[in-house]
Image (cartoon, grey):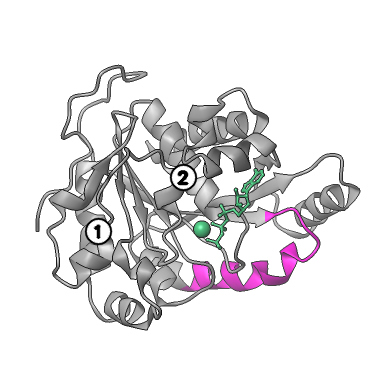
Amino acid sequence: MTAISATATPPSTPVSSPGPRRLGQVLSVVSQKGGVGKTTTAVNLAAGFARRGMRTLLVDVDPQGSVRYGAGLRRGHPTHGFFDYLIGRTGLREIILPTQLPWLRVLLVGTVTEEASHAGYQALVADTDILHDVLAEARARCDVVIVDTPPGLGPVVRRTLEASQHVLVPLQCEPLALQTTPQILRAIQDIASSNDELTLDGILLTMYDSANPACERVADYVRAHLPADIVLDTVIPRSAASAEAFAAGQPVVLRDPDDPAAQAYLELATLLTERLQ
Ligand SMILES: Nc1ncnc2c1ncn2[C@@H]1O[C@H](COP(=O)(O)OP(=O)(O)OP(=O)(O)O)[C@@H](O)[C@H]1O
Ligand SMILES: [Mg+2]
């Protein structure tokens, strides 16, 4: 397999120097429900890790392909990605894209985004070991590999979890939030019975709005009904800067690092760094 490297170009100003090479960790971001902040979390955590000098690869396996719009890619980047590698259209090296952060590289999902049906992509991911092999290779060359996944518990998410060491579940602070949480937790538990490396890092409350009493009720309910160690203390506030940064094609942790959501993502990156060591 072609090499994946998050260090192809020497960094200019890393926040800190990386340590000696170790096997990296794959952290996937999953949720049963759509629109809960998975991509925002994946993009900002990846930037947060890279800012800390960790060799980071952000992988998009969601055929919606949203990472492309929020990861701070350079203008005119190639649009080929994982799907194009799956169907033999490209090698891996040329689709590992640089970003404005020296330690952050991105593997987009590729041209499947433009296809009317994603069934062929899903079948290829389900029926081959290619995703597993790509993530294993990435792990060998990076400190951390963040995977943004499609909503639901389809074959792409299952295959991703089979190849992950860590999983994070964003849960949007809104009244229907708890409806789908048991299913995703059961699926993680189910996959963990055959992938004993898989650890649930926690449920991450997202888009928390302190001015909205319903939001606070959901957060309280979630904390009261799920085991305490499952719900992360860090909560991501709803912030206009977060949505604006995404629209401007950048992680909020880079565009507006003092924004409360950016601060929360940076705090989360610090917390998870300790667990990934
Ligand atoms: N903390 C936040 N504050 C304000 N807006 C946010 C925040 N987090 C995410 N959003 C916005 O909410 C929308 C959904 O977020 P995002 O795309 O990250 O969700 P997702 O779970 O990846 O969705 P999908 O299931 O479709 O992949 C986007 O418009 C995003 O900009
Ligand atoms: Mg998404």
| Quadrant showing the C terminus | top left
Density class for disc 2 (Cα within 10 Å; few <14, some 14-19, many ≥20) is many
- 275 horizontally vs 82: left or right: right
Residue 188 coordinates in the image, percent (x, y)? 51, 67
Q: Residue at x 68, y 38 (%)?
A: 240
Residue 250, placed above or below residue 116:
above
Numbered mark located on residue 70 in the image = 2
Residue visible at 54% across and 34% down in the picture: 252
Say if the magenta span includes residue 208: no
Ligand 1 has an atom within 8 Å of the beta carbon of the residue at disc 2: yes
Q: Nearer the viewer, residue 227 or 49?
A: 49
Going by the numbered disc 1, the residue's amino acid type is His
Q: In the displayed structure, would residue 175 be above or below residue 236?
A: below
The answer to whether one can see residue 194 in this image is no
Q: Amino acid at mark 2?
A: Gly
Q: Is residue 188 visible?
A: yes
Q: Residue pushed farthest front?
A: 76
Label drawn at residue 196: none
Secondary structure of residue under mark 2: helix
Q: Which residue is mark 1?
A: 80
The span shown in magenta is 172-190
